[in-house]
Amino acid sequence: MLRDGAAISLWQNAIEPFQPKYKTLPTQQFDVIIAGAGVTGISTALQLQKAGKKCLVVEAHTLCFGTTGGTTAHLNTFLDTSYKQIKKDFGEDGIHLVASATQKALDLYKHNIETYNIDCGYEQKDGYLYAIEDDQVKELDEIFLASKEAGVDVAYTDRIPIPISFQKAIIYREQAQVHPTKYVYALAKAFEEAGGVILENCSVQEVVEDEGRVVVATTLGGVQASYLVYATHIPPGINLLHFTNAPYRSYAIAVTCKENAYTEGLCYDMYDPYHYYRSQEIDGKNYLIIGGEDHKTAHEKNTDACLNKLEAHARAHFPVEQVLFRWSSQYFEPADGLAQIGLLPGSKGNILVATGYGGNGMTYSHISALLLTDLVMKKENAYAALFSPGRIKPMAGFTNFIKENADVVAQFISKRISAEKIKELAELAPGEAKLVKYEGEKLAIYKSEEGKVHALNPVCTHAKCVVGWNSAEKSWDCPCHGARYSVDGKVLTGPASKDLQAVQLIDLILK
Ligand code: FES
């Protein structure tokens, strides 16, 4: 299966790509169109289809192409934003609601797996949060108290299931883990069997919301429905959400260990960014999965170095035998610590969105599946207000800001440039990329392993920020709202919907 990066994740390995039943748009009526076929899109579509709605899932690439194919798939009743912080910002009601919403999400995983008899390496495991440094101990105590108050099953423990020294630790009971792509593929099959339609390689081009309907132009034709759900991490266009969510990258490796040193739990330290650990058995083989080294998208010059650091960390603490997979993925950090699930700000009532998951995408995906289904079915939902995207109010001048950005069309130097004039071309090694200056303008150039040079206008087609090179995934990433492009400028992930402009190099002689 394919993913939005050059590195191969553990979940892509040895899995046959899902083959949707439809290749073209069938001539039937739909109630809901869901854009995005990751864990959020597919689990929401299945819930809605089961509730009696006719659903169409459109995916710009292929199933699990985005973060679902690059997650480390921890399912938790606690979030990256601690209960201590949630209590401070959202009060006692907030912590109780988050505790019960996350529990319901985990229950839905279990229910789906039992209902559809899904073989996806699902296991319930305990989660361990531990303090190593002195200043982390007080923080841990406060998190413990707030978690307890929230109603989560948590206790102190004097052991953690990984060989790392710590001062104090707490244990969250009955967390879970899953093989994410196997799980989503099985849900997709169940969705199609229930009458749902999935179209891959079909992207949303234009949306008009009018008189209680959405009219959606896609690359495979036009379609109408009562609702459109953006399950694309961040929606396209320019919206309040692009200013209340920041794109981040996280790194993961999957290794085999000597001495059977695979952890039986889900473990988290308290550094910022934190490390996270778990094991997964796939086809009889054990893997230890370690994640961390998070940073804001396009804010690290050398992303390969992040993977190297993670690998060094793994080797320092575990008897690593072989590093088999190294990859990274993207998530969106919400401004106030909680996800934004519900009506898209500015929508007339027919466009829904789920974003701002932080590092808890797998858990939030199922909170979204339940909440979005209730919103479409016009049923009360206890979590609607807490997660409403409308809870964050635009700052003064915001409307003008959007207008200005939306109106600006990127201007760029001539589309044909003499390669000889760009002296940095000669300095590029195969597989390397660089932003270079050409007559006062920037140019993004990449030399393939075969020596082919791709030159692009590095101005992001979303709102004009300049992209940066991601060496670990061989992509051009935008630091502003997380759009990502392949080496030849094709959109890998939104919010951009247009490719980077290609620049033709003439007189190009490669050595
Ligand atoms: Fe918004 Fe690039 S993603 S400017």
Image (spheres, grey):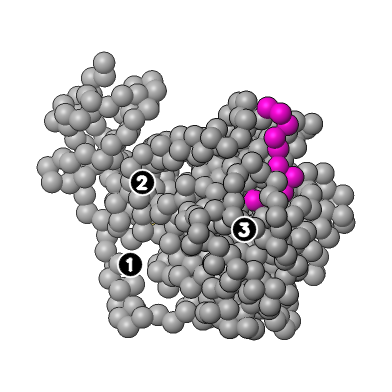
Observer-nearest of 363 and 23: 363
Label 1 vs label 2: CA separation?
A: 27 Å
From the image, state whether disc 1 or disc 2 is nearer to you. Answer: 2
Q: Earlier in the sequence, mark 2 or mark 3?
A: 3
Q: Let me know if residue 367 is in the magenta part.
A: no
Q: Quadrant of residue 284?
A: top right
SS under mark 2? loop
**Looking at the rendering, in which quadrant would you find the N terminus?**
top right
x then y, percent, for residue 129: 63, 57
Q: Residue furthest top?
A: 511
x then y, percent, for residue 260: 73, 31
Please report the bounds of the magenta region as a residue range. 258-267
Which of the numbered marks, if any, corresponds to residue 349?
none
The three-letter amino acid code for the residue at tag 3 is Lys
From the image, state whether disc 2 or disc 3 is nearer to you. Answer: 3
Observer-nearest of 441 and 383: 383
Which of the numbered marks, if any, corresponds to residue 168?
3
The three-letter amino acid code for the residue at tag 2 is Glu
Above or below 434: residue 114 = below
Which residue: 21% across, 49% down?
412
- Does 358 sit left or right of 471 as displayed? right
SS under mark 1? helix
Above or below 138: residue 114 = above
Which of the numbered marks, if any, corresponds to residue 406?
1
Label 2 vs label 3: CA separation?
A: 32 Å
Observer-nearest of 82 and 114: 82
Q: Which residue is mark 2?
A: 300
**Looking at the rendering, in which quadrant would you find the C terminus?**
top left
Q: Residues within 10 Å of mark 3 (few under 14, many from 20)?
A: many
Label 1 vs label 3: CA separation?
A: 50 Å
Q: Earlier in the sequence, mark 1 or mark 3?
A: 3
